[in-house]
Amino acid sequence: MRFIQMHQTLARHDAIGNDIEIIQKLLSEKHDSLVYAEKNFNKNVECLDEEKLDEYLRDENTIVIYHHSLFWKEGFAKIKDAKARIIFRYHNITPEKFLEPYNDVSCQQCMRGREQTIEFIKARPEANWFCDSTFNSFDLLGVPKEKISICAPFNKIEEWGKVAPNEEILKELIEDKCINLLFVGRVVPNKGYLMLLDILRFYVACYGSNVKLRIIGKFFDDLADYNEIVKGRIEEYGLSDNIEFIGEVTDSTLVTYYLGSDIMLVCSEHEGFCVPVVEAQFFGLPVVALAECAVPETIGSNQVLLGRDIREYVAAIKVITQNDEYRKYLEQSGRKNYLERFSYEKIKECFIKELSRMGVDL
């Protein structure tokens, strides 16, 4: 059996890139497992050329797993009339409303990507859909329920668990008298940065400045107006000493911040899954999160999910950092959520089971 995964860009340190890489390895154990991407930045995956792709797409024995997370004109053109069997892997697309005030091009890309979801449904009504979460499946209007499967994206968390942390940074975090908060995510409007800053400001007002929020994620030049709003809010609130933008990091450094921080704070308004939540849970970092989008589904039971009242977040931070028993309960519940739902073996089991339900037996 021949499988081809398709995505416009194959990145290295990226949730979708990890998903593609691990699926490629899993399928290659017994079958031909290939990947096609217009741009490949992942040295662990070798991509086939376009000519070979076109040849395989004309073969009805080929199974394509098409990763849909953005507008890709050329990708749609290639699979629209392909004789190969199509399975869509839907990772969700940010609603354009989040980007509309800041960048017309990005807004249009998101809008066209979501419109393309509808086009895929119409062009390939026989296709099956793999969704990262039940939340993602809500976008698939017109797709029969029996053609929708829920399977979390594969991750490299257990692999990271074997990576040695940066001892210097870890020592600094552990010995720091401040409460160390962490958020992992791109600096984009749907990630809830302004709410994060409101929470930080209120905490400082109530309990003093012995708190620091570290952000692991990069700014984007095409969101200059949003970047200025975030930076301006930090200055307006007088939080320059209480927040640090780390940027992009190595696996070792990321693990270090998960191990050395006190709480993971998540205020995202739109997530199709939110991998950093389960990363934090694996490494024993309590998570306090906004109960919206796919986050409640991902975070699991017995965790801290709140509404939009920032006072509740401040109270939660205080309780978790002062009550060791409650903190340990959150750590254990989070770790259990990962092991029972998102370990490699659990996702593999789900992936193979759902493929079999689609009539594809590995």
Image (spheres, rainbow, N blue to C red):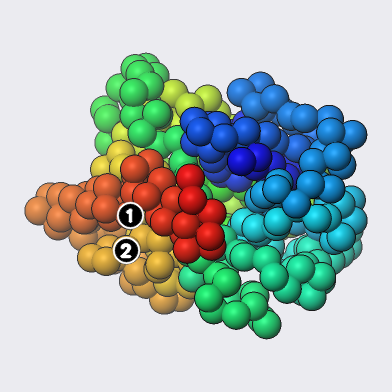
User: In this orientation, does residue 35 appear?
Assistant: yes
**x and y, in percent, of residue 240 in the image:** 55, 44
Please name the residue shown 32% across and 34% down the image: 259
Q: Amino acid at mark 1?
A: Arg
**x and y, in percent, of residue 24 in the image:** 58, 35
- Quadrant containing the N terminus is top right
Q: Nearer the viewer, residue 122 or 72?
A: 122
Judged from the image, the secondary structure of the residue bearing numbered disc 2 is: loop
Q: Nearer the viewer, residue 194 or 341?
A: 341
Horizontal arrangement in the rendering, residue 169 relative to residue 33 (left or right): left
The mark lying in front, picked from 2 and 1, is 1
Quarter-wise, where is residue 160 in the image? top left
- Disc 1 crowd rating (10 Å Cα; few below 14, some 14-19, many 20+) is some
Which label is found at residue 300?
2
**x and y, in percent, of residue 350 in the image:** 40, 55
User: In this orientation, does residue 242 appear?
Assistant: no
- Disc 2 crowd rating (10 Å Cα; few below 14, some 14-19, many 20+) is some
Horizontal arrangement in the rendering, residue 97 relative to residue 24 (left or right): right
Please name the residue shown 86% across and 52% down the image: 78
Please name the residue shown 70% across and 25% down the image: 46
Q: Amino acid at mark 2?
A: Gly
Which label is found at residue 341?
1
**x and y, in percent, of residue 337 in the image:** 28, 55
Horizontal arrangement in the rendering, residue 5 relative to residue 291 (left or right): right
Pointers 2 and 1 in contact (CB under 8 A)? yes
Q: Residue furthest left?
A: 325
Real-space CA distance between mark 2 and mark 1, rounded to the nearest whole angstrom: 9 Å
Judged from the image, the secondary structure of the residue bearing numbered disc 1 is: helix
Please name the residue shown 51% across and 33% down the image: 30
